[in-house]
Image (cartoon, coloured by chain):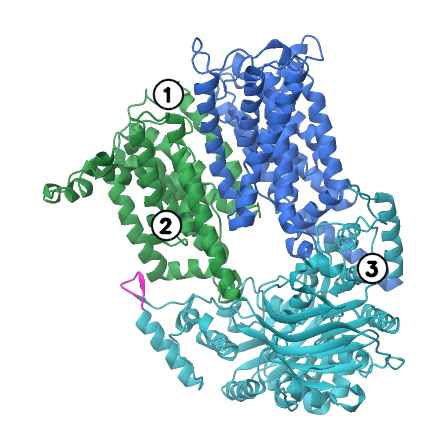
Amino acid sequence: MLESLLSPEFFNAILRATTPILFAALASSVASKAGITNMALEGIMLFSALFGVIFSAMTGNFFTGLLLTMVIGGLIGWFLAFFVLNLKTDEILAAVAINLIATGGTVLLMLAVSGDRGSSTSIASFSAPRIVIPLIDKIPFLGEIISGQNLMTYLAILAVIIMHLFMYKTPLGLKIRAVGENKNAAESVGISSRKIQYIALILSGVLASMGGFFMSGGYMNMFTKDMSAGRGYIALAASAMGGNTPIGASLVSLLFGAAQALANMMQLTDIPHELIQMIPYLTTLIGLGVYSYSNMKRRQKLAGK
Amino acid sequence: MTCLEKNIILQMNHIMKIYSNGVVANEDVSIELEKGEIHALLGENGAGKSTLMKVLFGIESPDEGQIVLNGQETTIKSPQDAISKGIGMVHQHFMLVPSLTVAENIILGVEPKKKGVFIDMDKAVFAAEEIAKKYNFDIDVKEKVEEIPVGIKQKVEILKALYRGADILILDEPTAVLTPQETDELFVQLKKLKDNGHTIIFISHKLDEIKKICDRATIMRSGKSMGTYEVKDITTEDMSRLMVGRDVILTFEKEPAKPSKVLLKVRNLSVNNGQGVLKVDDLSFDLRGGEILGIAGVEGNGQTELIDSLTGLNKSYRGKIYIKDTDIEKSSIKGIRDLKLGHIPEDRMTSGCAGNLGILENLFSNQYNDPEYSGKMLLKTKRIQERSNELIKEYLVKCKSFRQNVGMLSGGNIQKVIVAREFSTSPDIIIANQPTRGVDVGAAEFIRRRLLEFRDAGCAVLLISADLNEVFSLSDRLAAMYKGKFAGMFTDVSAVTEEELGQYMLGLKHQEEQEGMIYE
Amino acid sequence: MNNAKRFDLLRMLFAILVALLISFVLIFFISEEPLTAIFTLITGPFRSKRNLGNVVESMIPLIFTGTGVCIMFSANQINLATDGGFHLGGLVAAFVVLKFGLPGGLSPIVALFLAATAGAMFCTIPALMKVKTSSPELVSSLMLNYISQWFCTFILMHFLQDPSVGSASHKLPENSALPVIVGGTNIHVGLIIALVVAVLGYVFLYKTKTGYELRLTGENEAFARYSGINIVKVILVSQMVGGIIAGLGGGVELLGPIYPRFSWMALLGYGWDAIIICTLAKKNPLYTPLAALFLAYLRTGASIMARYTDVTLEIVQITQGIIIMLVVAEQFLSGMKHRMIAKEARASLKEEEVA
């Protein structure tokens, strides 16, 4: 057991399990920085997982499939923004509605496309490829972890860097942070907070859709009903615990990814698999408790007795 | 003089604004600005000054009326639109992003770029320093806004507007949060701006400041304009009469106070705010039954923190508070209220009521546990309804029925609901924090009379008010609060003048201080 | 009823109509026989006594979770663990009737009591975490739903499983089933329990001291605190009562005539349905039966449609989603509302001037 925990395969598995959560956590962080809780991540991932399969099968290659899926993700983000910002719908209830529509809509759509209501096995889709990095893959241990990952995993790591630069070095990032922290201040200098929040939510949708795409085109090679399995919600927690910064969110995602990978590996042991399935959720729950508690203590200390 | 000679830069004509809760904030208001003047917009809280300026700055859209800028009729759709038309606004509550630096705040929305994508931070810092130098503002632009004092924050606000090329600058009660030195400094800078051809709208209700710096003044009262005057031609007495609609000196026929035993005892109270800043500094005083202790002070000098500690809202204070000899350190808010304490909160909408609930629900939040109104588990609905009707009648609340949501009432009527609730428990101690702020004259008068009645009945009243008139006319003892201490305490209120009190409030004067002074 | 309230009601009906129309358009896209499908969806529930009975029967779980969510949301506690609480209630009820071997009359009573207790304990976890660590109940409750699902599956597969049928429990004993009250249908005693719970929920929220505290806190927590209300108590009580009702609902549902065995592997989603019930009922439990009737009618119609045409049941989830979106969209038709209020204000202004 311990041996397999230290094997490069396990670290490899951690990165794989982290990838979808990481994309979603980045999605949550950009929305949160703009002042909106995007609980619709779950539904966006679910929709994207299905659309990824459909689009890559339709276009015959994964890359256009990915691009089209990202468009879908952006559209759902826009839809959420329209309801929350224009029609003043409560953001949580709007997300609940989108997630409901996703649960029903994906089954309906899959049935229409593949004639199956459980999974999309009958659709010949294309997954993102695994990339072997020459030379690096020759490094013992480390090379085995770094090289040979799915392309989407590399994209996720790239996304962390890009999002960090975007949030902290570009005018738009500055505006997003300003709107989220003090909307009135941003408005007072003529920034349209609505426009900025639209952009943030659309971007959030695009990022979440990449996570969804990986679910059905990398992590697995097909779409199954309800396959996002709460990852959108886990990402929400990861982002909050990472202080809604891209780097922080990615580190916490790694922790939750490890929990998922551990659960996957323990499937092979004698421990009942139902209990093992609880591990990612329990880890998140406990992590959330610990993080919130230390945060609360820090605030109390500041107020100081 | 013809219109042309006067060089009118802006006209707002017949502005009408009704909020979606039915409140009429501006009713046929007109105002005219000459280029290069400092124009005061004068009025009490809730007179409609802010609404009018929000309309000008594109935050609110008027229901009726027109805006003429540089001789052309225009509509201002958004703050962005206003800024592009050369209008800048410095809000009363600073519109700054605390975690960003001064330079970042200044360039926010108009960022210089490099390589087409990234913010050119060096250029931003340079530009910010440049403009600060031009108008003689002494600021370190690399500091984070959360770490700089209030006075500097305001300068950042002005720089922000100037950086965006504002010709017309709206300043919303700019001196409310400043020290006298900072105020003087601000005035020097405003004069400089005026000399540079900027036009300034100066919103205030401080008459001396208007006399000192403004050329003309438009006076507003309850949503209407009372006319525009040359400041040099109008006396402060006339201004205040137009503002409040009667002679300012409020006189209440009141019996001399008959102070009885001490009901509230505060010893060595120190309180930090959420950011860890010391707001109440080693304060000790007594409050007796049958007297009104008034506390005057500029907002932000520790009044909020003091009240929060007395009423149990804030538990992390140092020192001792006794209500009727009970140390309240371990008491819950309910425990404190059970000692017969009534509390009119500073901000009626955030903590004084639930706008989406009915008047009835709002009248009983402090006394639903009374056996009169509830049994072990159930509320006595019929009795509560009867009592609601009584209270609505007694406190002259204008409403359709007790089912009407409180949020739909006018400010004055909401305040009456709150006062009715807090007074109906026949409290022994009343803490009244800005009890008549933004309330119409009739309602204010009513509330003040009630406070006096309670005092005559032996109740101890602590009155915190920004309205000097109010503290002067009601208080039996009067304290000026400055930086968490009583800078002055006057036992004979009639012997102190408004000017003198003002000097104590602004920290220009303070009575000789003894270590651990107790104001009995 | 004043104008604003009447307007809200009309707006809600209009939102439902729009949602239905959008769903019909969708049916036109996905179906070969759209008109038949829509016709079946609308008239299906009336085609037989059995179908009508199904409408009424499927109201039962909706009333339970709807009432539970009404209570939690009234206190502004966004706890979404009702789904998991309902699931757990079902499991506990199954466990009791299968394992305790209690006599006929007593068995369902004990089962329901313990189901409610389990639901209460489960839904109080987010409340405790909020009080002790200030964790947002929204995220913790979402995690708990999945934990509940896997925990229940674990108990099912290791303690209750009937090896001869695979992933289901042994047959539930006849003597602990809730009796059917209308012959020829599936309508059972649970309906009466559900209606009683809805009325009690109303009494709790609107007629008791604790309910008053909940509503005050839900509308403005700062005001409630200032008034001396114990916020910690409100957080705990509201989520616990919500949990009691959810757990009881799960127990009632399982002991009804529909489920011969405990076989719930995935969450049933009644917790999410509860949100639309709560939205339509404007957080008042008294209206949950009405909202549940609407949703049950739609569901039953859709399942009949799914049986006879090529449109599947899931279309209803889409309809539900759109209804939530539009009903809670404050600005939906708000222009009309603002004009109405402005007109009233102007009128009363004139009155004042005359007087």
Q: Which element is circle 1 on?
A: helix
Quadrant of residue C295 in the image?
top right
Chain letter of the green region: A
Q: Is residue B439 visible?
A: no
Q: Is residue B313 left or right of residue A262?
A: right
Please provide percent x and percent y for residue B212: 63, 90
Q: Earlier in the sequence, mark 2 or mark 1?
A: 1
Instruction: Please tell me whether residue C315 is drawn above or below residue C168 in the rendered image.
Output: below
Label 2 and label 1: CA atoms lie apart by: 36 Å
Start-end of magenta stretch: B114-120
Please provide percent x and percent y for residue B362: 76, 53
Chain letter of the blue region: C
Label 3 and label 2: CA atoms lie apart by: 52 Å
Q: Residues within 10 Å of mark 1 (few under 14, many from 20)?
A: some
Front position among marks 3 and 1: 3
Please name the amino acid that badge 1 sits on. Ser
Look at the image and give the colour of chain B: cyan
Residue drawn at (75%, 51%) of the image: B405
Instruction: Please tell me whether residue B459 is drawn above or below residue C247 in the rendered image.
Output: below
Please provide percent x and percent y for residue C301: 60, 19
Please provide percent x and percent y for residue A77: 44, 44
Q: Is residue B263 left or right of residue A149?
A: right
Residue marked by disc 1: A114
Q: Which element is circle 3 on?
A: loop
Residue marked by disc 3: B425
Please name the amino acid that badge 2 sits on. Ala
Q: In the image, are marks 3 and 1 on the same chain?
A: no
Q: Is residue A43 left or right of residue B70?
A: left
Label 3 and label 1: CA atoms lie apart by: 70 Å
Residue marked by disc 2: A249
Identify the chain of the residue marked 2, using the numbered disc in the image. A
